[in-house]
Amino acid sequence: MLHKIEALKEQMTPAYKLVRKDDPVTSHEAAEAVDANRMERKVYEVIKRYGAEGAISDQVLFVLEYYGYSTVTARYKQLKEKGLVKTDHRKRKGKSGRNQLVMWAKEHYKEDDDALSEMQC
């Protein structure tokens, strides 16, 4: 477990990636103050708990209900860029009735057999 935490620490998002160059000074200060790495770990652990079934955003937000929407959803992109979370074409209906991408921790991701067979035809 310690090895996994150390590997995750090495892949943490630096503060400069949390803000745009033309954002106000207050945004830059907030980016320095926020513990994005801790939040990334929380989001990653929730997605990982869903195992091979994967999780949609509504499920992650439900588990992390005490955090704001953008605090949680902003971590998806960072985790995907680091290769810790995978998505593909698969979606499930969220509570709004709209489809949401399914996300998997990389160790639980399996290619969709239907999509693979369509690509081979």
Image (cartoon, rainbow, N blue to C red):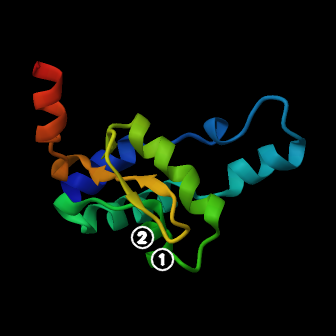
- Nearest the eye: 33 or 39: 39
Does residue 9 lie above or below 81 as drawn?
A: below
User: What's the residue type where badge 1 is placed?
Assistant: Phe
User: What's the residue type where badge 2 is placed?
Assistant: Gln
Does residue 16 lie above or below 34 as drawn?
A: above
Q: Residues within 10 Å of mark 1 (few under 14, many from 20)?
A: few
- Residue 62: give its label: 1
Whether label 1 touches label 2, CB < 8 Å: yes
Q: Residue at x 11, y 19 (%)?
A: 121
- Nearest the eye: 28 or 93: 93
Q: Quadrant of residue 43?
A: bottom left
- Residue 71: give its label: none
Q: Is residue 1 visible?
A: no
Query: On the rendered image, what quadrant is the N terminus found in?
Result: bottom left
Q: Residue at x 34, y 62 (%)?
A: 55
Q: Residue at x 37, y 41 (%)?
A: 10
